[in-house]
Structure formats: structure tokens, C-alpha cells
């Protein structure tokens, strides 16, 4: 028995940090949306009681460090499932990029195993389990567009962003999310306009959405990796309507409303980065599986 699940990447249209919590995590306010750049996860039931990870990407761990492995382990332990699973990950989303690739693989594994093992869990129950794996996993269980608060695991659904293209450019460096949060000076934060961003989605106002993109982690990653600033400049120079770093980076995304401009921005970035993508926002939430 097999099931195939899509694991889409996310971008943060806005990312604010309110304060550092006693548990070491940061209290955040993030508007997130899924984009049409996805890993494909194939889950095959095994009679032997093991979890196997198969991936051709050398940056993806094939043991218990893999977030998809952790998702299967969590379901097996909580629901006392004795069956095994082979998890094959066709990796498309760049790794350690600020696009939640690992979190989305974990979320897709939760949704897929719910179906494969006929567990009957709701998306809410899967999202709650996912929050034990990582802060971004709950959002990835639902997909779509949402305001994420708490450490990222509290989800309020929002309307899909106005139709547009997203050009993504990832420099060869990888960024550690923990290091970026560690280097953030919470006292000096200039807060982005989260409520205005939400308003732009509710009123389907593309220009207002572009004006209100903001990410407080951007300046931290930029100071650690100046090449990210160069990519931002290129993206602006080639005509993207608005440009921002996603999550803790280093991926930079540019929004483009008209298809006629997409090729120009895409080609302009190809000379600077190996990994460049032109995709659509997904808008819609994930099906249960
Ligand atoms: C920055 C964001 C924005 O969407 O995404 P990425 O850049 O990783 O994609 C997220 O907040 C990342 O979420 P995720 O990658 O799931 O983080 P976790 O595994 O839970 O945490 C990794 C580390 O980041 C720090 N962390 C994470 C979330 C948070 N609200 N406060 C934190 O301080 C902690 O040091 C933690 O040990
Ligand atoms: N399924 C997975 N895909 C990618 N990375 C994974 C996965 N499982 C664990 N990891 C580890 O998680 C780290 C963060 O990866 P990723 O989720 O791609 O980035 P980000 O947190 O920036 O969105 C990587 O360095 C990698 O070692």
C-alpha cells in the first residue's frame, strides 16, 4: 500500500517578533502562505516495524534527524502502531532556506500516514501533533494562508493573497534558524505592519500587500551574509514589485503581478544564483490527504 503527498514550501509575507519567552523561543506574529514549489513524499507501508527514509539529496538526513522520520515516529508512539513505513522524499525545496521544506515534509507525512493507516485524525489533531516537531509544522499541516502566533504554532486562517508570481532566489549558503533568532536584538526591532498586511489580504489589494511586506529577521541574516543584500538589489533592479527575505533566510522572494515581467526577473537572477524558481502562490489549504 502506497500514498503520495505534496509538501509545499511557505514564504513569510510578514514576520514580527514581539518578545523572547522564558522557554527560549520567541513570541512571533507571522503572515505565511504556501507556494507552488513542493517536495513529493511517497509513503509505502512495510510489514517490518521500521521507519526508512529514502532521499537522493545529500543535505537531507536519512535517520531520526529527518523531520519526516520524527513525524512517523510520533504517530507510531502516540497511537501504538506496529506497522512500518518507507518515506521517499523527492526534494525540490532548497534545504535550510527559510522555506520550511523539512517542516512541510513532516506535515505531509502526518497527513499521508493518517490516510495510509486509516487513523481518522482531523487536521486540527495533526497540527497539534506537528507542533511538537517544530514551530512551522502546524502551519504546514493546513497550508493556505494564515496568521501564525505563539512560537508559530497557533494558526488563524486568512484569505489567499491576490494573484501574483513569486520569484525565489537562494544563494548557496544555508542558514541556521536558531543562530538568526540568537543574533536578533529584540529591543531594537522596527515592527512590520502585520495588521495592514492582513487588511491587504482581506481587501485583495496587491499594491497594499507589496507595501506592507516586512521581516524583522532580515537585517540579522543580511549582516551575517552580505550576499543576501546583493540578491535583494538584483531582484529590485530587474523589476520585482516588492522584495523580501523569507523566514530566517537566506532565500529572497520577489512578487511580480504581470506574467510579462516574470521572465525578465527570473533571467536576471539566474546569473547570480544556482537556485531560482518562478512559481505561483497556492492560496488554497491542503486537503486532509
Ligand atoms: C523563522 C521561521 C519563520 O517561519 O522559519 P524558517 O526560516 O526556519 O523557515 C520559523 O519561525 C522557524 O520555525 P522552525 O524552523 O520550525 O523552528 P523550530 O525548529 O521550532 O526552532 C528552531 C530554533 O529556532 C528558534 N526559534 C524558533 C521559533 C521561535 N518562535 N522562536 C525561536 O527562538 C529556537 O532557537 C529553536 O531552537
Ligand atoms: N525532510 C527534511 N528536508 C530538509 N531538511 C531536513 C529534513 N529533515 C530534517 N532536516 C534538517 O533541517 C534543517 C532545516 O531545513 P529546512 O526545513 O529545509 O529549512 P528551514 O528551517 O530554513 O525552513 C536542515 O539543515 C536539515 O538538516
Image (cartoon, rainbow, N blue to C red):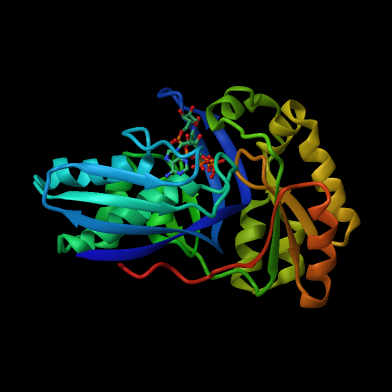
**Can residue 192 be seen in this snapshot?**
no
Q: Position of residue 84 (x, y in %)?
A: 17, 48
Q: Position of residue 225 (x, y in %)?
A: 74, 30
Residue found at the very far front of the displayed protein: 56
Image-quadrant location for residue 36: bottom right
Q: Is residue 65 above or below residue 146?
A: above
Q: Is residue 21 above or below residue 289?
A: above
Left or right: residue 117 compared with residue 279: left
Left or right: residue 3 compared with residue 13: left
Seen at 65% across and 36% down, the residue is 217
107 or 284, nearer to the observer: 107
Q: Which quadrant, please, contains the N terminus?
A: bottom left
Q: Position of residue 162 (x, y in %)?
A: 65, 73
Seen at 69% across and 38% down, the residue is 172
Image-quadrant location for residue 66: top left
Q: Which quadrant, please, contains the C terminus?
A: bottom left
**Can residue 80 be seen in this snapshot?**
yes
Seen at 80% across and 45% down, the residue is 231
Q: Is residue 190 above or below residue 264?
A: above
Left or right: residue 166 compared with residue 56: right
Q: Position of residue 122 (x, y in %)?
A: 24, 62
Q: Is residue 69 above or below residue 113?
A: above
57 or 3, nearer to the observer: 57
Seen at 51% across and 55% down, the residue is 147
Residue found at the very far right of the displayed protein: 237
69 or 142, nearer to the observer: 69
Amino acid at each position: 500500500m502506497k500514498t503520495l503527498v505534496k509538501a509545499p514550501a511557505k514564504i513569510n509575507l510578514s514576520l514580527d517578533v514581539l518578545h523572547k519567552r522564558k522557554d527560549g523561543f520567541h513570541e512571533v506574529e507571522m503572515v505565511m502562505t504556501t507556494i507552488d514549489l513542493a517536495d513529493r513524499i511517497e509513503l509505502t507501508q512495510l510489514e517490518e516495524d521500521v521507519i526508512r527514509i529514502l532521499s537522493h539529496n545529500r543535505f537531507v538526513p536519512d535517520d531520526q534527524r529527518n523531520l519526516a522520520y520524527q513525524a512517523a515516529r510520533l504517530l507510531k508512539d502516540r497511537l501504538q502502531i506496529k506497522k512500518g513505513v518507507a518515506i521517499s522524499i523527492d526534494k525540490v525545496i532548497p534545504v535550510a532556506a527559510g522555506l520550511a521544506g523539512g517542516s512541510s515534509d513532516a506535515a505531509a507525512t502526518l497527513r499521508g500516514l493518517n490516510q495510509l493507516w486509516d487513523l481518522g485524525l482531523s487536521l486540527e489533531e495533526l497540527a497539534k501533533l506537528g507542533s511538537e516537531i517544530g514551530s512551522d509544522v502546524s502551519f504546514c499541516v493546513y497550508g493556505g494562508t494564515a496568521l501564525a502566533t505563539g512560537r508559530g504554532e497557533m494558526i488563524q486562517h486568512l484569505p489567499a493573497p491576490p494573484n501574483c508570481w513569486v520569484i525565489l532566489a537562494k544563494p548557496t549558503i544555508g542558514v541556521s534558524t536558531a543562530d538568526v533568532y540568537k543574533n536578533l536584538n529584540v529591543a531594537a526591532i522596527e515592527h512590520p505592519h502585520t495588521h495592514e498586511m492582513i487588511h491587504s489580504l482581506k481587501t485583495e489589494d496587491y499594491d497594499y500587500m507589496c507595501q506592507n511586506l516586512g521581516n524583522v529577521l532580515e537585517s540579522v541574516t543580511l549582516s551575517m551574509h552580505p550576499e543576501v543584500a546583493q540578491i535583494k538589489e538584483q531582484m529590485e533592479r530587474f523589476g520585482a514589485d516588492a522584495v523580501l527575505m523569507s523566514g530566517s533566510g537566506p532565500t529572497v522572494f520577489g512578487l511580480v503581478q504581470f506574467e510579462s515581467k516574470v521572465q525578465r526577473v527570473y533571467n536576471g537572477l539566474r546569473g547570480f544564483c544556482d537556485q531560482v524558481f518562478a512559481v505561483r502562490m497556492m492560496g488554497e489549504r491542503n486537503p486532509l490527504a
